[in-house]
Image (cartoon, rainbow, N blue to C red):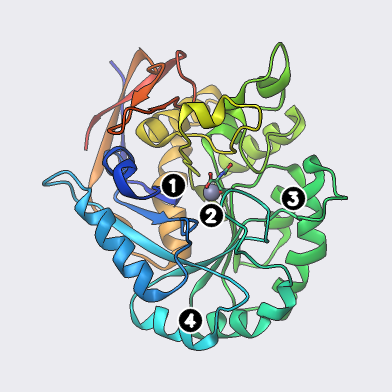
Amino acid sequence: MQTLTLTLPDDFHVHFRDGPMLAETVPATARAFGRAIAMPNLSPPVRTPQEALEYMDRLRKALPPDVEFEPLMSLYLTEATTSARIQEAQRLGILAAKLYPAGATTNSEAGVGDLEALYPVFEAMQAEGLLLLVHGEATDPEVDIFDREAFFIERHLRPIIAAFPELKIVLEHISTEEAVEFVNDGPPTLAATITPQHLLLNRNDMLAGGIRPHHYCLPVLKRRRHQEALRRAAISGSSKFFLGSDSAPHERQRKEASCGCAGVYSAPFALELYAEAFDQLDALDRLEAFAGHFGADFYGLARNKSKVTLVREPWTVPLKIDLPNGGQLVPLMAGHTLHWKLAAR
Ligand code: NCD
Ligand code: ZN
């Protein structure tokens, strides 16, 4: 039997949601991760440091007993965010703020329309050391959905980086070769997260032979060339690319609908899913740094001290997960065989 022992990883991009859903999502992530950045796109969003602390409390209350797990909090930037709010966030231990271009994705309606209006806030974040987490997709309806990331990078992200050379920026859930190149060529203040679905799938897996709503997420899966660029980036050993699952649960009936929600639920098996991708690329020796070192280093956090162990053992991802409210989630790769399983933490 083969085993793989890794530094306990962190997940730098998770949608836990709120309310009864937390009984599913928080234990799911805490099972294999030591920390996770909790995305603030609740409805209504987490806009103030006070709201973030209250949300952190709800996340902590949803933890199983004796599990060591630390939710890391982020603020949702709106056009009403002030520099004073950023300073307060810093004082209260909030690490980051998330930029959602208005209308780009789930619960982004309160996001930012005019990015330049936010420059004073970016200035404050740079001064306070808060990270800027970016949903990097243009929202101009004229821009083709497959081009929105590349367009955002050139039109919006490049100027932000030029204007704020000390602001740490994470381009979240990158989905294109253009993003990989941009991050690789960018300054050391720029990094990116990569999801398991963007490593394991391309748009054929969503659209060929029938539409598969459970593979629909934003940024939308791209053609194979992009998947391959992401796979190369993940296993490259570059510390600019690290784990952020973007686990984003939506109940089955909201995915399997005439207008289905964007988001893939991967939390319960996220580490196994990444192991699968790295194994496919014969690069399991690169998994530990991607999952447990580079993200912590970029955030300026100490790496976790404890370990997790995966064993090589085929198993089948369940077809569904039942929620406390009677609803269901369909996890990423439902019904598929994976080859690594968490054995111990
Ligand atoms: C996320 C969600 O559902 O909150 N959806 C997604 O497709 N990734 C939002 C986001 O990260 O874009
Ligand atoms: Zn997300």
The quadrant of the rendering that contains the C terminus is top left
**CA separation, marks 3 and 4?**
26 Å
Specify few, some or many for label 3: CA neighbours under 10 Å numbering under 14, 14-19, or 20 or more: many
Label 4 amino acid? Answer: Ile
Mark positioned earlier in the residue sequence (2 or 1): 2
On the picture, is 34 further left or further right than 106? left
Label 3 amino acid? Answer: Glu
Mark positioned earlier in the residue sequence (2 or 4): 4
Q: Is residue 45 visible?
A: yes
Q: Label 1 near label 2: C-beta < 8 Å?
A: yes
On the picture, is 343 further left or further right than 274? left
Q: Is residue 320 above or below residue 267?
A: above
Mark positioned earlier in the residue sequence (4 or 1): 4
Residue ranking furthest to the right? 142
Specify few, some or many for label 2: CA neighbours under 10 Å numbering under 14, 14-19, or 20 or more: some
**CA separation, marks 3 and 1?**
26 Å
Say which residue appears at 49% left-offset and 47% top-offset.
244
**CA separation, marks 2 and 1?**
8 Å
Q: Report whether the residue tagged 1 is closer than 8 Å to ligand 2.
A: no
Tag of residue 86: 4
Q: Mark 1 points at which residue?
A: 289
Label 1 amino acid? Answer: Ala
Q: Label 4 near label 2: C-beta < 8 Å?
A: no
Callout in the foreground (3, 1): 3
Tag of residue 149: 3
On the picture, is 309 further left or further right than 202? left
Q: Name the residue under label 2.
A: 239
